[in-house]
Amino acid sequence: MTIFLIGAVLGALCLAAYMLSSAFRSRITIQNLSYSDFPPDHGELKIFFISDIHRRKISDNLLDNLPAAPDIICIGGDLTEKGVPIERTRENVKRLCETARTVMVLGNNDPEAGLSSLEHLLEEEGAALLKNKTFPIPSRSGKQISLLGVDEMKFRWDRLDLVLRESQESDFRILLCHNPEIAKKLTPETGIRLVLSGHTHGGQIRMLGFGLYEKGKIHKKPFGDLLISNGFGTTQLPLRLGAPAEAHFLTITSSKK
């Protein structure tokens, strides 16, 4: 019995250590996407996408391992939460802004940190907060590539209609929204080919392959692709199982030869 108990305790400790290490991995998932309506003369559009940072610190190790210099960095909401020191949040934003032009949408936990102070911080560090706004991505092709930032759905701040109207002259559109449920409002006619989202943490703790949410991945939809990230940080417990922390490096090209 004593040997069994010691084995059980050691097994539990090893599992806890593994879950802790999974929560603090600096893994970059590399994804290559191509679309027939992406401007072929633009070449490659490189996006670094990171969501659900919460309480984590963005390290030099993460940014040093980017496969190339991104054209733009997208923060998919939940940059922070209640109790996170504002200087930690500032340092994270500063590191990202020093790497490339950075834009962000709000998540459901961001308001806990104080919206006015967060908005002031983002403005000071040069990050653009997209509250139902469109951000033009500089294009080498002369075509208009737009990033549509939709506000947090939990509080009914989202106004998809506004960003669709504002971007109606765009040649290619990417939508950034914290909550992947925004995809239910999209059809092929909305002209969105890619959605970047997080929020679910991939279930965070998955037992035997099952969790509260699906593990993060790219979902094929009638309108295009929906990327749901496992997220970079955690909420409540700093533990993960079966859904390791991740950020994303996306390279978008035209499928036309």
Image (cartoon, helix red, strand yellow):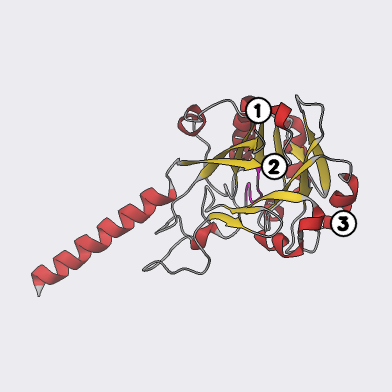
Tell which of 213 and 118 is nearer to you: 213
- Type of amino acid at the residue the image marks with label 1: Ala
Residue 161 at x, y percent in the picture: 87, 56
Tell which of 46 and 48 is nearer to you: 46
Residue to which mark 3 is pinned: 161
- Type of amino acid at the residue the image marks with label 2: Ser
Which numbered tag is attached to residue 100? Answer: 1
Residue lying at 74% horizontally and 61% vertically, measured from the top left: 153
Q: Secondary structure at mark 1?
A: loop
Q: Secondary structure at mark 2?
A: loop
Q: Is residue 218 above or below residue 144?
A: below
Q: Would you identify the image quadrant in which residue 68 lies?
A: top right
Residue to which mark 2 is pinned: 36
Residue 228 at x, y percent in the picture: 59, 55
- Type of amino acid at the residue the image marks with label 3: Asp
Instruction: Name the image quarter holding the N terminus.
Output: bottom left
- Span shown in magenta: 75-80
Tell which of 173 and 70 is nearer to you: 173
Instruction: Name the image quarter holding the C terminus.
Output: top right
Question: Neighbour class for label 3 at 10 Å: few (<14), some, many (≥20)?
Answer: few
Residue lying at 81% horizontally and 48% vertically, measured from the top left: 131
